[in-house]
Amino acid sequence: MRKSTRLKISGMTCATCAETIKNALLRREGVENVEVNLSTETAIIDHDDKTDVADIERVITEAGYAVQRENAVFKIGGMTCATCVATIENALRKTNGTASINVNLGAEKAYVTYNPSMIGIPDLRKAIEEAGYQYLGLEGEETAELEKMAREKDLRSKRSRFIVGFAVSIPLMVMMYLQIRIPFPMAYFMLVVSTPPFIYVSYPIFKAAYRALRNRNLNMDVMYSMGIGVAYVASLLATFELVLSRDFLFYEAALMLASFLTFGRYLEARAKGKTSEAIKKLIGLQPKKATVIRTGKEEITPIEDVVVDDEVIVKPGERIPVDGVVIEGSSYVDESMISGEPIPQLKKINSNTVGGTINKNGVLRVRATRIGRDTVLAQIINLVETAQGDKPPVQRIADRVVSYFIPSVLAFALLSFAVWYFFAGYTLLFALTRLISVLVIACPCALGLATPTAVTVGIGRGAELGILIRNGEALELSEKISTMVFDKTGTLTKGRPEVTDLVTLDSTEADILGTAASLEKNSAHPLAEAVVTYTKSRNIQTKHVTEFDTVEGKGVRGIVDGKETFVGNRVFMDENGVTWKNEIDDKVTSLEQSGKSIIFVARDSSLLGLMGVADPLKEETHVAIDQLRKLGLELIIVTGDNERTANAIAKSAGIDRVRAGVLPAEKADEVKRIQGEGKVVSFVGDGINDAPALAQADVGIAIGTGTDIAIESGDMILMQGEIIDAAAAIQLGRKVMSRIKQNLFWAFAYNTALIPVAAGVFYPLFKIAFRPELAGFAMALSSVTVVTLSLLLKRYVPSAKRMKIGRFDNSIKERETKP
């Protein structure tokens, strides 16, 4: 059968490009004809039905061009187990034009990449609905209320069904066990009493099974329908004594089974609704309206109407609606919901603001710099949603197991019936009971939920803690990391030089600082800025300078208080005849060995004193390094600084290995070299300057703050810009992976242990076998257990984070106790 595929292509610049694409496609087996239009940037490819569109796109990509695609996230209702995921993925895959499909059971969303020139949202929606599931809208649309209503309606329906089921089945079971006498035959009584509630309770199960079979899928609903259907039909035959005797009455068991299945799904649906609470909180941070200055007046307008360079008024208690810069006013702003930082930050003129944060006490006038999807909050939401939909490799293993699970269970159920009835010589009643028990106790749902629920909750928890995790693979690799490589400047250190030492000789500290700052304030050198900043912090006044001059690479000179004054390095002092005693050389050598730059201050030919200037370690660096050592990681500094400075910083931080003199462009090569030693490497650095190294590392951890963070830069992004969060990120990743493994263990253990019990394997020796209704209860419990274990991650606080919170609490107490 012949097909025609239309693709939108970018990167073509001339007729040669079109010809290149055409020739590349025609060489592909199965492609019959190709028409490439340069002006519309489209290609129409005629091919046979065996040729996959993904293969065609791969040929174009390998030729050096790009196929234009779009991404959409669909909210879906009605998914109950792992086979529902497969059903939806298969339905979407059958639509011509989809490139990649990933359905997340825990988040109840489908992440679809598609070719917009071949297929649209209505086609994809139709595929979802024809597969028998609810389309609840697209991510990003205002569908929260619709989603909430659909969820509440579903929960109400399930609740009313299992209540009715238990209300009827429990009294019937009591009557059967106590053999209560009634004035008419029990079989007819049970038929009349149980049939209406059985139809009411089991209808959604049979409907879902029909839907699955129509789509040629075997899912849990098919198995459950077989189990409760066999029980009910056997009871019906026994009632009228057609083939079966009255011993085969399972009315109460069939109804109770359907009730337990519905009860389990009710609990599961409630629990699943909580796994995405973190992303719902983030979405809830987005303001719906803004107060904008238009024609000199304040005007309340929908957030969609705000444009870049609009001036926005933010009053106390309001959320800042856009990313921007303060042009008037000052106030403290609570940014904890974005960065996790508990202390409100002071915002004044020229301070950057982040949309979604709360203005605490003053009125701010903010000029919008980023709006809509470009804001930091929107990017965070997009990243978290994408990451929650990602499948780590461990989930793909579980998905493969689930694909073989149901056929295996069906075969095992039939085998157990045949063995007990035809070979072991047990009664038809016993064999039929074993068949029903196996069908209803098997649960791939627990396997299907084990990974996505943990990933969804874990990534959401990370966002709450100011740690953004880009994908599931980063989580999985976090437990395999053996080596962590750090950039030095701005990562381990504060990223700006500070005066750390002051040595006085023939003068006072105030005189030395005032004299030095008087000259240095005219210089733009980073060391000069450090001197001026330190002098201001000491409230020391500067003096008038005349005849100022800069000697590049050496220092500055000028007339201060009528005397010639010099501020600079040792060479500059020697050139100007400044001398000092020999013991000063020992102090200078000691400071230099500590990796500090020395600034000499002299008046005429006399040395007044000297300062040691360095980029000091961040306050939390030692704690972070200690936490990372406890994780068993090898720690390495890679920096462009000279070896003496790098070694001094490494020694102070407690890091053994150093690679100094490495240019930014060479850091990626250094990471690659370490990977060549067979190590799994994480690189921690600036999301902008260290992009190549972050990309090369197995797990790139980017550090940044507020609007300065490059959201696209790493596999993990630390929003607070603190190195201690690198330890917290690894701890969180390892905790999530540990929980996934626990979930998978319980899911596998449950099925491995209980299916044989339900089949009666232990009955000959120990007389142990599950009744069908107990099997149904166990099945319901397994899925709820897995989801509950995942939800416990919502309370998890990494030990590195706990230490940081402890330091914050202590600083508050210290402030409160000060007189």
Image: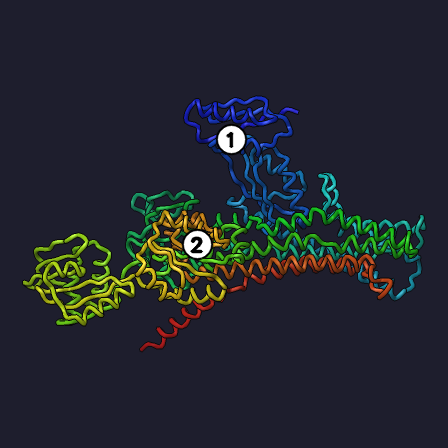
Single out the mark in the foreground, 1 or 2.
2
Q: Is residue 592 left or right of residue 668?
A: left
Say whether disc 1 or disc 2 marks the residue closer to the N-terminus: 1
Mark 1 highlights which residue? 60
**x and y, in percent, of residue 159 in the image:** 69, 56
Disc sitting over residue 683 in the figure:
2
Seen from the viewer's position, the closer of residues 365 and 713 is: 713
| Residue appearing at x 17%, y 61% in the figure | 570
Amino acid tagged 1: Ile
* Separation of marks 1 and 2 at Cα, in angstroms: 33 Å
Which quadrant: the N terminus? Answer: top right
Label 2 packing within 10 angstroms: few (<14), some (14-19), many (20+): many
**x and y, in percent, of residue 84 in the image:** 67, 46
**x and y, in percent, of residue 479 in the image:** 54, 58
| Residue appearing at x 22%, y 67% in the figure | 588
**Local secondary structure at mark 1:** helix
**x and y, in percent, of residue 443 in the image:** 72, 54
